Image (spheres, grey):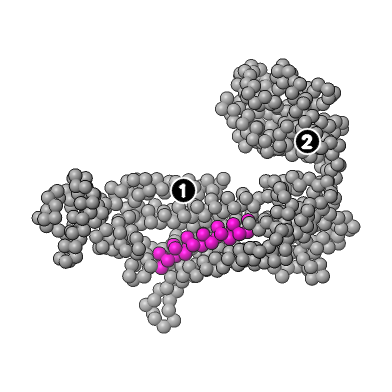
Amino acid sequence: MKIRIVSLLSVLAAAVMPLHAQQCMTWDEAYRRADSLAARLTLDEKISMMRGYDKFFLPGVPDKGMPYIFTSDATQGLRLNLNLPDPTMIRQIDRSTAFPSPIMLAATFSPEMAYEYARAVGEECRASGVEVLLGPGMNIYRNSQCSRNFEYLGEDPYLAARMVERYVEGMQSTGTLACLKHFLANNTEWYRRRSNSIVDERAIHEIYTPAFVAGIEAGEVEFSLENEDIHMNVESLLTDKIGAAGKRLHTARSRNDQVAVDLRLFLRREIDEIVRQILDLQQAVLDQAKQHQEIVMPGYTHLQRAQPVSFAQHLLAYGEQLKRDVTRLLDCKARMNVCPLGSGALAGTTYPIDRWETARLLGFDAPCSNSLDGVSDRDYVLELLGALSILMMHLSRFAEEVILWCSWEFKFIELDDAYSTGSSIMPQKKNPDVAELVRGKTGRVYGDLMGLLTTMKGLPLAYNKDMQEDKEPVFDAVDTVKMCLPVFAGMIATMRVLPQNMRRAAGGGFINATDCADYLTKKGLPFRDAYTAVGNLVYYCTEKGKLLEELTLEELRGISPLFGEDVYEALRLETCMSQRKSYGGPAVEETTRQINELKFFIEEARHG
């Protein structure tokens, strides 16, 4: 029995979701109190708070320790926007400088605002060549009386801990944070002691072992149909392993929010793999383009020969399409990266759970904001199916060109034997089966999208059983795309280009006619008149069975006296292509730029 392991992972990871005591005041009251305290601070008090005192006593709130962050450079002056509580307050500080307390920030800002503030401070430090350290005040968590330090926040140490994490991460993101030992070494144990986990963390580690997971993947763990689904089976397994504590696993959750978080976790991981495969295909396109920048081929409109382009430019057009596929998938991933766990069946829970901490443990950016939406939202599945449909459309268009190019009517390329097959009766045949199969699979992914759109269109809030039909189409689409991309990349990487056939095709069809009209326009003839003159030339050539460049100067001047000896150089296909230097054109200078941009995109996407 094949099991999607994401369900097990999410349930076990979320089992350590902390519960904390009810707050002694509302958040609105805490914010009002913090704002009131901040408003009573004098300018000198504000500055002294920033100057590295180990303790700063807020007026009216005795003995509230303030952790601080300071620069390691005590001599270099640093111009900083202190930004708390007055964003316009800017001071020149000439000695060891402390930045606003993370705990103070928690009173007035959200964790994400603290992160953005830390990034701004870090960027200013980096620009000034200042290194940032965590000060000893961060050891607040080791203080047995530490709960008092959070009293004016409503005694919510979890908000403070989360905010400090985001503050440190914000500094870290700028490359200016030099020391994390106080936070990482000293705070983690305190935080865990303060967390009232509903299941012993050691028990989770006991069941969640590589051997146990491998056993599930290998089908060695027996699941019972009596337990109905993966979630109840996991609870049963956990109870067998650790006893009665396992029965607490379903506290504050429902299968509705569990399956929603499972699917997001699974698709988030699958998007990363699909993006990696697209980048592999882009690399194959890039490698072929670099080798064929000067190869002239006919560009087409309406499948009619139109103007000369290079084979590199033609390939790089697909590189651009694949760029958009990558960014579209990453955008989809960003939007789906909110955590529905804690939404319950639809209306949340009466337990004082910390959904922000649960989201952090599972790698989400935030919890979903509305519990009904959390369990009923499948936009992210539809968006992913839409992105995959567009990706498959691009592959199908590319496949169609490959099919044309390797036919005898074109014969621009020859596919490797590994990506083509023969005929059972016609010995001369070499069929582009891989390209045809990818083209055919596109309709299948379209069907997955349309099927789920049809399922979702009539569903009221919140969860409905119809929504279990989301799994089959999205699993099918993901599997189909992951099957197509690697073989397509291999096909492009190994195909043999036939430049002489491309050049021969480019020589017919008067694809230099526009360049001939441009020649006359540059000689002073209005473009519309030049267009008419060259149209007459093309008609004359058709009647005589000649190409434009084969006409004598006398014949050319019979249409326009502006033609000179230099017209023959202007009509050379290589000249026509090389002169198209406008941004995005086929000239070597431009395809070189496009190649470099695609190379940079691939490298950034792989390592970013």
Q: In front here: 160 or 457?
A: 457
Q: Say which residue label 1 marks.
A: 599
Classify residue 166 by image quadrant: top right
With 380 as the anchor, is 11 left or right in this view?
right
Amino acid, disc 2 = Asp
For the point 80% across and 64% down, the residue is: 233
For the C terminus, the quadrant is: top right
For the point 43% across and 79% down, the residue is: 423
Q: Position of residue 429 (x, y in %)?
A: 39, 76
Classify residue 30 by image quadrant: top right
Residue 127 vs 319, above or below: the answer is above
The dot on residue 28 is 2
With 313 as the anchor, is 551 left or right in this view?
left
Amino acid, disc 1 = Lys
Q: Position of residue 466 (x, y in %)?
A: 70, 66
Residues in magenta, as a range: 380-403
Task: Tell which circle, 2 or 1, labels the residue nearer the N-terminal end.
Answer: 2
Around disc 1, counting alpha carbons within 10 Å, would you say few (fewer than 14), some (14 to 19), or many (20 or more)?
Answer: some
Q: In front here: 156 or 178?
A: 156
Q: Secondary structure at mark 2?
A: helix
The dot on residue 538 is none
For the point 19% across and 47% down, the residue is: 525
Inspect this view and state whether residue 12 appears: no
- Given this view, does label 2 or label 1 mark the residue nearer the observer? 2
